[in-house]
Every structure is written in C-alpha cells, then in structure tokens.
Amino acid sequence: MSVTHAPEGSVDVLRRQDPELAEILLGELDRQATTLQLIAAENFTSSAVLAALGSPLANKYAEGYPGARYHGGCEIVDVAERVAMQRAQALFGAEHANVQSHSGSSAVLAAYAALLRPGDTVLALGLPYGGHLTHGSPANFSGRWFDFVGYGVDAETGLIDHDQVRALARTHRPKAIVCGSIAYPRHIDYAFFREVADEVGAYLIADAAHPIGLVAGGAAPNPVPYADVVCATTHKVLRGPRGGMILCGSELAERVDRAVFPFTQGGAQMHTIAAKAVAFGEAATPAFSAYAHQVVANARILAAGLAAEGLVVTTGGTDTHLITADPAPLGVDGRRARGRLAAAGLILDCCALPHDDARGLRLGTAAVTTQGMGEREMGRIAALLGGVLRGEVDGKRARAEVRELAGRFPPYPR
Ligand SMILES: *Cc1c(COP(=O)(O)O)cnc(C)c1O
C-alpha cells in the first residue's frame, strides 16, 4: 500500500515566505525518495497523517485529559483525543490507552513512574543484547534512578536465554520485568515473561516500540493480554506520527495517566494525537494487515539474501521487520560498512552484536514495503549490499542502481 499524494503542495507556502527552509524540506524529501530507507525504526507516513500533523490543532493548549482540561476551548480537540484512544483500544484489545506520550522514551519513563520508585530493581534485556537506552543505560534516567539487572541471549542461537531470565528473576526479585528490544529479530514469548513475573511478584512491562505495528496488522503476537503495561511508539512499523503511547488495563489507567501528565509531561500535542488517530484508523484496515504481513515476508527474503551474500544473520533469520547481521566475513566491520552503504544510498544502522566487540548492521523492511517493494526487490537490495561491501560494485554504480530502484517506487507519488 503506498501513499497517494505528494506533500510538496504544503511546501509552496513556505517557499514564498522562507525559501531557505523550503529548500531544506525539499532536499530531505528528495533524499528520502532517492535513497533506500533500511533503518528498522523508520517508515513513510501517509499524506493524511502529514495533513493532521501540519494542522492548526498544533495551536491548541490542552493540559489534562478529555473532559478535564486546565485550558478553555478544548471541546473539539477532546473529541480528537477520545477518537485516538478508542481506536487504539479497539486495535490492540486494550481496556485503556494513553496517547499523549511525546515519544517511545517518554512512554517508558511514564510506565516506570506509574509502577516504580527510585532505587527499585528492574530486570530487562541488557544493552549489549538489544536493550533500549531506557532499559538501564547509565547515560539515561533509567540507569541512574533504578537498579537494572540485565538478561542476555544465548551465545549459540542468539535467542533470549529464558533459563537466565528465570534465574535472575528468582535471585534479584525485581519490582518489574521489561521485555522488548531495539534489535531482537524474533517474536517475544510474552506468556513466558508473564509466568516469570507472576512467580516473583513483578510487574511486566512490554516495550513493544518496534513490533507494535506488526501487532496492529496481525503479523506479531499481541503483548496486551500478558503485560501490565505496554509501551510503544507510533512512528515505526505502525506508520503514524513521531510519538508514543501506553496501553494498560482499567485498574492501572489512572496511575498511568497521572504518570504521563502531570508527572512527566505538560500540555498534550493535539496535532500529533489527531495524526495518531489517523494512523490507528489506517492500521485497522485489511490493506494495513496485508502490509504488515508483506513487511515480514520481505524481511525473511532480505535476511536469506544477506546470508547468501556471506553476512552472518543473528538468530539465522527473522520473525519481524528487523534483521541484524555481522558483515565481518566480507572483511568489513559494521561501522565502516554503514558508511560505505550510505554512500551508495543504502541507509541503515550499526548495532551491538551479542557476544562480540565489533559492531553489526541493523536493518528493517517497514519503509521499503510501504513504497510497494516486494520479494524481488529484496533480493536486489541484498545483492547490491553484498556487492558494495565486497568492493565488487563501485560506489557510483551502486548509487545509480539505488536511485533507479527507489525511483520506481516513489514514497509519495505525484
Ligand atoms: C524506539 C524505541 C524506544 C524509543 O522511542 P523514541 O520515540 O525514540 O523515544 C524505546 N524502546 C524501544 C524498545 C524502542 O525500539
């Protein structure tokens, strides 16, 4: 499913008033349309989502929640927020949705604020294995305010070490267990984490920032029936505006809401909330479900293609949109590989590799699938990537091939 209206129209006004910024916006649009966005966390929102984001709802101050605001004149934006909440609740089968979190990190901060006190012990996937900054990094509030214990993945299989999770939970008796990752390519066994959390009396927080869009499309298991609180972003596979949300049962609704506002945020961003509602509406369609399944099918083909090119694919493949791979067998580490590929127009991330000091590559298929690419194009991308890293395809030729491929699948067709 590709989006059907060029966003250049909205730049016209800007072009007349501020050519400098108009140039920048058009330059970025051109960059996105002529390179391949393989960053696992990125996607192309629809023009309907962009329209809501660029709307006068951005002008409205709305501290509080629908029906209980600190500002006047909220009667219309209240409806927008109620629609966003109802759509999210229906989409994920949740009793309560808070759609005000400004980002995925803000959603996690609020989840901790709702359930924990500073100094509490939290068990989460360790950062070297794909834990997010908010899962205990010393550079983040989480590492400073809580006592994080990290579980890991099996050195052989790359899969989450369930025996270790259970053993660490029994030893450390955490107040909360976090499951969710920035780089884990497989489904997470939420029933297992629920069982361990129940055994030690911990809350279960699912940080589903990455897979929540696959959940919406029925292409990944839903954490909502298992976790006490689910944190998510709206801008990754879900294809909405940049932002976060929190899903929970009615018994925690009030604590979660108070943890978002007034504890960690001020006024809600009503244009973003309206855009989230638009994205939830899109995600409830059969077309989005087909999209989510195609994202996974594309990732499986791309992973197999990368393995055939000689990269070592973590866990041997993927269940999701996300792949991590070690390019070392091609004689290059992740950091240098990322630079070389970027010069060719293949835009992706480095990531930590489990049990290895070198950096690997992390890539995803959400954006290229939105553009309408399928399994044939994934094979072509894998071959190009391998050719560039082996030095067989020179940068100029690779860049021309990427430009040609991207040109056939414009993210915003005119
Ligand atoms: C992306 C991500 C986040 C943070 O989202 P931001 O919107 O960048 O703050 C948090 N947790 C996980 C697991 C993520 O993948």
Image (cartoon, helix red, strand yellow):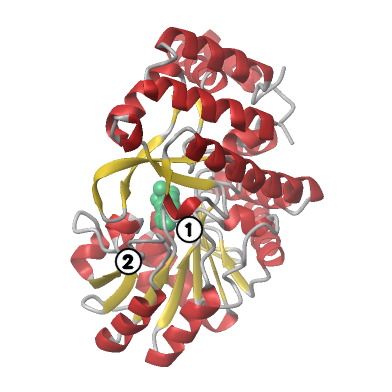
Counting from the top left corner in percent of width and height, residue 88 is at 65, 61
Choose top left, top right, bottom left or bottom right for residue 339.
Answer: top left
Horizontal side, residue 350 vs residue 145: left or right: right
Foreground of the two, 92 or 71: 92
User: Mark 1 = which residue?
Assistant: 63
Counting from the top left corner in percent of width and height, residue 270 is at 56, 48
Counting from the top left corner in percent of width and height, residue 404 is at 60, 13
Please, what secondary structure does the residue beneath circle 2 have?
Answer: loop
Instruction: Say what amino acid the circle numbered 1 marks.
Output: Glu
Q: Earlier in the sequence, mark 1 or mark 2?
A: 1
Query: Residue drawn at (34%, 36%), measured in percent from left and top?
Result: 329
* Residue extending furthest toward the right: 286
Foreground of the two, 90 or 351: 351
Instruction: Say what amino acid the circle numbered 2 marks.
Output: Gly
Horizontal side, residue 59 vs residue 362: left or right: right
Query: Residue drawn at (54%, 8%), measured in percent from left and top?
Result: 16
Query: Residue drawn at (48%, 20%), measured in percent from left and top?
Result: 28
User: Mark 2 = which residue?
Assistant: 152
* Residue 74 visible (yes or no): no
Choose top left, top right, bottom left or bottom right for residue 295.
Answer: top right
* Residue 139 visible (yes or no): yes
Choose top left, top right, bottom left or bottom right for residue 248.
Answer: bottom right
As drawn, 342 above or below 127: above
- In the rendered image, which quarter contains the N terminus? top right
